[in-house]
Image (cartoon, helix red, strand yellow):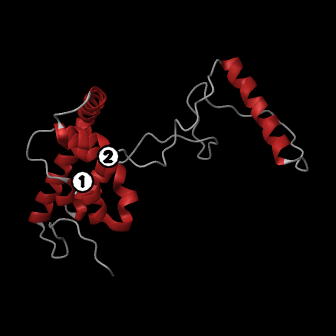
Amino acid sequence: MTPKQEIQAMLGDLFSDFEIAAFRYELARRVAHEGVPPFVMLSELDILTVNHHFRHTGKQWTAVNHNGKPFPRKSGIIFDSVEWNLLASDAALQKEFLQRIEMIRAARGIKKPRKNTKNNNKGASWRKLELIDKGSNLDDSDRSARSKALKEAESLLPLLLPALEEIKRNHEFLERNSDPHYSNEPFRFRVC
């Protein structure tokens, strides 16, 4: 079984909620010192801790700011009072709106983003883990991809260490306060 299949089997329907965190944890674990448990051996609390530290944090506002915080400098605009003809077709409204956006981008020197560059709906590519695990008998393309994956894994180490420290603190706390409802066994979903 591949690492993805193991984690998918363990998490079931919740796989999509924890996939990015599980992948990033496993990637960092590949370059960390020995003794870091695989994701499938983590307890429920440990998985929540890993998810807190490794969930994807690169999400940005897509198009509209609803929370009142300003956009980063130069990237946001508040339109002056513009009256839109609500009886016009959607295509006409979209065309006019996008023309205004393009004019503002051009005036500010902002390049139009490529399609799907901020698409966060895709799952993680688990091929990186497979390449790291395989290690030898790779062609040039796979060696290059493996090298990039190792660099990405090393960049995740600063996230792994605080997560492991928090997991250790949680275990110590639970041992001192022995809660009969807590299980330090590997994560298994229970049907309620």
Residue 4 screen position, x and y as percent: 29, 54
Question: Image check: 21 left or right of 40?
Answer: right
Residue 125 screen position, x and y as percent: 36, 44
> Cα distance, mark 2 to mark 1?
9 Å
Residue 24 screen position, x and y as percent: 30, 44
Q: Is residue 31 above or below residue 41?
A: above
Residue shown at 49% from the left, 49% from the top: 121
For badge 2, the amino acid type reads Trp
Residue 161 in view in this figure: no
Question: Image check: 130 left or right of 32?
Answer: right
Residue shown at 85% from the left, 41% from the top: 92
Q: Are marks 2 and 1 in contact (CB under 8 Å)?
A: yes
Residue that mark 1 sits on: 2
Residue that mark 2 sits on: 126
Q: Secondary structure at mark 2?
A: loop
In which quadrant of the rendered image does the N terminus lie?
bottom left
Question: Image check: 65 left or right of 53?
Answer: right
Q: Is residue 148 above or below residue 36?
A: above
> First in sequence: mark 2 or mark 1?
1
Outermost bottom residue: 192
Residue shown at 58% from the left, 31% from the top: 114
